[in-house]
Image (cartoon, helix red, strand yellow):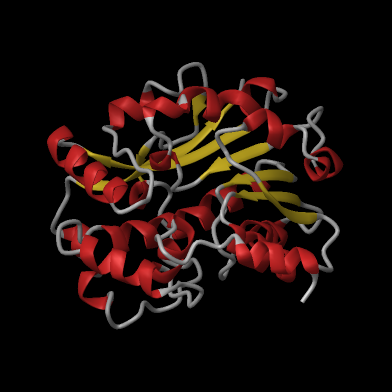
């Protein structure tokens, strides 16, 4: 094992859950630990919507990336990309536009290790270790400068990660840094877990943050307030299941049997869901 790999492994947290590993488990992934599974199984009895939400977001990723390639976008920055699984951004984009370039950004060292192994022979896609709260550092990263031409339209994606930005993190600045500097015709894609009832949202935030994963559930109006001045792409910011649904898109991997009882919870519990969409810089 190379020295960099040893260093990466030594920094992987095994005693607290991480969002990337927990999210990956809900997508059918196997790169997780007991602490991640135990955290989810403690969370789901109170917030059973989480499994559906994770999977609906992944399906949204396919649809939004496909739309962006059809709109002519050929470069993507994916913030908080999570662990590699089926139909990652670069794989979806290249189904429709083989010349696409992608930079993945994540703070979890296990994402870096797996991503680098997957992309070792790909010169037009990379994964960098970065904290999405530190946008200037990301913009100055050599791989970003190598692959992303900010004189051309770019899509920056914050998919199912906005809820990991608390108000103390300055979420508006985080979301707007790249898109505010990008040329017209660029896009911001995002999604965030929301609650129509602020009290239930606060309870969800307290539970997940208390388990070691930074989290802030917002209302749809609070998300909207972060995005003024950008033009929503039809149908606007909505529950992700209503964003250009497509019954023919590729299916996701099946969930683990421990998570299967929670599938379908969003059909009965309507108050917590993933909210988002795509916005264009005019």
Residue appearing at x 27%, y 79% in the figure? 258
Residue 154: quarter of image: top right
Residue 155 in the figure: left or right of residue 265: right
Above or below residue 39? Residue 178 is: above
Q: In this view, does 122 lie above or below 176?
A: below
Q: Position of residue 74 (x, y in %)?
A: 75, 45
Instruction: Give the quarter of the image for residue 115.
Output: bottom right
Q: Position of residue 219 (x, y in %)?
A: 26, 32
Residue 88 can be seen in this image: no
> Where residue 152 appears, x then y in whole percent?
79, 31
**Near-viewer residue (170 or 255):** 170
Q: Residue 39 vs residue 251: left or right?
A: left
Q: Quick check: can you spot residue 17?
A: yes
Q: Residue furthest top?
A: 229
Q: How many labels does the image show?
A: 0
x 45%, y 60%: residue: 59
Image vertical order of residue 78 relative to residue 246, above or below = above
Taking the spot 26% from the left edge, 77% from the top edge, the residue there is 260
Q: Is residue 272 above or below residue 169?
A: below
Q: Position of residue 79 (x, y in %)?
A: 58, 44
Quick one: 137 or 181, which is closer to the camera? 137
Instruction: Pick the quarter of the image with the C terminus.
Output: top right
Residue 134 shown left or right of residue 165 in the figure = right
What is the quadrant of the N terminus in the image? bottom right
Q: Which residue occupies the extreme bottom position in the image?
A: 257
């Amino acid at each position: 094992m190379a020295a960099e790999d040893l260093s990466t492994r030594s920094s992987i947290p095994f005693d607290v859950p991480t969002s990337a590993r927990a999210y990956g488990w809900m997508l059918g992934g196997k790169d997780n630990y007991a602490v991640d599974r135990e955290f989810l199984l403690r969370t789901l009895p109170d917030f059973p919507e989480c499994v559906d939400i994770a999977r609906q977001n992944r399906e949204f990723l396919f649809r939004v990336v496909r739309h962006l390639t059809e709109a002519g976008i050929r470069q993507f920055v994916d913030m908080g990309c999570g662990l590699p699984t089926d139909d990652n951004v670069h794989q979806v984009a290249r189904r429709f536009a083989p010349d696409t370039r992608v930079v993945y950004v994540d703070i979890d060292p296990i994402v870096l290790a797996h991503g680098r192994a997957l992309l070792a022979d790909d010169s037009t896609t990379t994964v960098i270790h970065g904290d999405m709260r530190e946008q200037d550092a990301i913009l100055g990263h050599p791989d970003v400068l190598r692959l992303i031409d900010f004189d051309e339209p770019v899509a920056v994606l914050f998919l199912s990660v906005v809820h990991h930005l608390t108000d103390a993190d300055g979420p508006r600045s985080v979301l707007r840094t790249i898109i505010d500097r990008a040329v017209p015709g660029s896009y911001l894609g995002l999604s965030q877990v929301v609650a129509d009832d602020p009290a239930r949202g606060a309870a969800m935030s307290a539970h997940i943050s208390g388990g070691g994963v930074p989290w802030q559930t917002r209302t749809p109006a609070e998300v909207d307030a972060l995005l003024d001045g950008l033009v929503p792409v039809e149908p606007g910011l909505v529950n992700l299941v209503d964003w250009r649904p497509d019954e023919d898109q590729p299916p996701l991997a099946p969930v683990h049997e421990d998570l299967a009882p929670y599938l379908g919870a969003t059909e009965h519990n309507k108050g917590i869901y993933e909210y988002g969409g795509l916005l264009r810089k005019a």
